[in-house]
Amino acid sequence: MVSASAPGKMILIGEYAVLEGAPALVYAINRKAHVVLAERTLSESLVEAPSLGIEAQPFVITPSGHVRFDPNAETSIQQRLEFFRLVYESLGNSFRQKQITLPPLHLSLRTDDFYSSRLKTKLGFGSSAALTVALVRGLMQITSSGQDTIEIFNMARKAHHYAQDSTGSGIDIASSTFGGIIRYTLPADPAKDDRFAERIPEWPELCMRVVWTGRSVSTKKLVKGVKQLNQQNPKLYGSLMDSLTEISRSGCKAFIEREMNLFLEAVNDFFQVQIELGRKSGMPIISESHQQLAELAAKLGLVYKPSGAGSGDIGIAFGNDPGIADQFALQAQKAGFQIIEVQAAERQNE
């Protein structure tokens, strides 16, 4: 029996532009996906997901490498395990390419940290990426095939892309793999160049307050909607991405060099271009909730932006005064929003 875990993430700056090669800052948080794997003597595997209310479900790997559940299993259960099915098929294929056949296993998957029982919803901290990375780590442990971080990243990114229709930059996979704070750039070839994920020390003087906007949204839907702007008006799309890229580059540099005013200015500028990107693409990147929180932050001298694709999920208020940041948190709560406590997480089991 082995266990493994991986942290979730929140993006500080660089959304959307990271897909075009811009640098982005991502922060691994102490909300983690956990997996426990045990070898079985029987021919079939079992998977359970207590976080989804799913008891142990039997499945087999077909000769063609597909995951096949009991055809008599409830349709709703199979639908809730669809992401696992796709990820596990991709990982099985990756291990076969290494001349390793996965044995029958009992897999227990837990993503409780990414759900709020009080709010009865999933929080937007990258649970699917964290679960994928944790699965890779666990499978590598139980097959005694090492724990090389670049290999973990590559296998997890490939599996996550397979399950998510090849959308996404891999920034969430990188955060779950490497932990800490990283400056991430879309890698041309991660096997040959590990500079795509540069570790950055924490910045204690930078105050952040994380807010749940009240609803979860589909990142894939928003990203695809923004990509359509590129098809309809490539010149406009290119101009907006150029702006986001330049601002993100400046923001990353300011964070690394501890230039507080320049970083806060970059966050605010990034938010303004996100507004324009949402308007031009027809995607609600800056929803009414995000706009309300941004105005609340501005009144207190803070800056604000969504973390991730926008519309719903989470946002972050930034500043350099803990007292003022706490005032924002209090006023946001009075306005009906939820403050989410997060801390930095390092590598998988820290």
Image (spheres, helix red, strand yellow):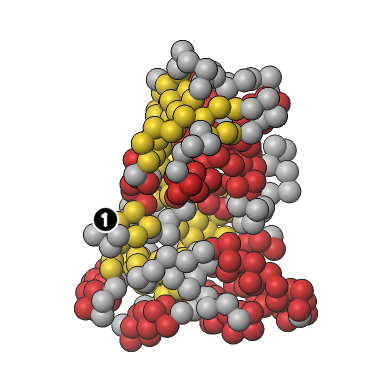
Q: Which corner quadrant holds the N terminus?
A: top left
Query: What residue sits 44% from the left and 70% below the top?
Result: 312
- Can you give x and y, in whole percent of width and height, for residue 230 in the image? 74, 73
Of 293 and 46, nearer the camera is: 46
- Can you give x and y, in whole percent of width and height, for residue 131 in the image? 47, 42
Q: Is residue 201 visible?
A: no
Query: What is the quadrant of residue 242 in the picture?
Result: bottom right
Of 327 and 322, nearer the camera is: 327
Q: Which corner quadrant holds the C terminus?
A: top left
Q: Is residue 105 visible?
A: yes
Of 89 and 98, nearer the camera is: 89
- Can you give x and y, in whole percent of width and height, for residue 21 in the image? 69, 60
Of 137 and 38, nearer the camera is: 38
- Image position of 116 with respect to 261: above or below: above
- Image position of 314 with respect to 54: above or below: below
Residue ID for mark 1: 117
Q: Badge 1: few (under 14), some or many (20 or more) residues near its Cα, within 10 Å?
A: few
Query: What is the quadrant of residue 260 in the picture?
Result: bottom left
- Can you give x and y, in whole percent of width and height, for residue 16 in the image? 61, 66
Query: What residue sits 68% from the left and 19% below the top?
Result: 99
Q: Kindly identify the amino acid type of the residue bearing the numbered disc 1.
A: Ser
Left or right: 112 as drawn, with respect to 140? left
Query: What residue sits 50% from the left and 56% below the top?
Result: 26
Badge 1 marks a residue whose secondary structure is loop
| Tally of numbered tags | 1
Left or right: 173 as drawn, with respect to 65? left
Left or right: 144 as drawn, with respect to 36? right
Left or right: 127 as drawn, with respect to 97? left
- Image position of 60 with respect to 54: above or below: above
